[in-house]
Image (cartoon, helix red, strand yellow):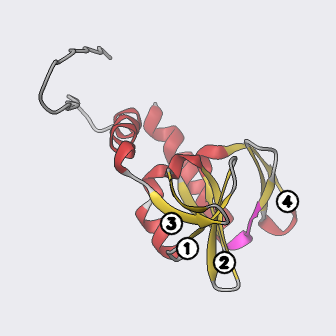
Amino acid sequence: MKVRLEQITDGEEEIIIRYREMTAQVEQLIDLASQGELKLLGVNENGQRYVRPDDILYIESVDGRTFAYTDEGIYQIAATLSQLAEHYSRCGFFRCAKAMVVNIYKIQHFQSQAYGRIEATLDNGEHVVISRKYATKLRQVLQEGIKDED
């Protein structure tokens, strides 16, 4: 893949991606280029702050409220898990349990557990469990990703 950079002195910056076939690598470039605009408004004890989806390790629903966990802290988000999993799936958000969405790009490694569950270790060392109901879909997502890169 050839990369060409051109510095401009004025006008709007733009990214042009030319491709013969839409591959996983091209999709990742598109996601990376468009992620600069994606932000979620989070609230914690220090006030409001925008949180980038790629900074989120996982999102959990507790007592009807939604919380996003990052390396920097925990933020309450005004959206449902279903909305987040659907809207940010290209950012790696995956529904892994009834009350949790995990960012699969923040998973360091997986380990199969009893009863069809999967334990995932995140980049920060935390462990989350992908329930049996969602484990099959996760395996499918991971296999499709591997197939696309060939």
Mark 2–mark 4 Cα distance, whole angstroms, equals 18 Å
Between 77 and 88, the one nearer to me in the picture: 77
Relative to residue 115, is residue 66 drawn left or right?
A: left
Q: Residue 113 carries which label?
A: 4
Question: Residue 96 at what x, y percent from top left?
Answer: 65, 66
Relative to 32, is 20 above or below? above
Q: Residues within 10 Å of mark 3 (few under 14, many from 20)?
A: many
On the image, numbered disc 2 is attached to which residue? 98
Mark earlier in primary sequence (1, 4): 1
Relative to 53, is 33 above or below? above
Q: Give the range drawn in magenta.
A: 129-133
Residue found at the very far left of the displayed protein: 11
Question: Residue 42 at what x, y percent from top left?
Answer: 54, 63
Mark earlier in primary sequence (2, 4): 2
Relative to residue 44, is residue 18 drawn left or right?
A: left
Mark earlier in primary sequence (1, 2): 1
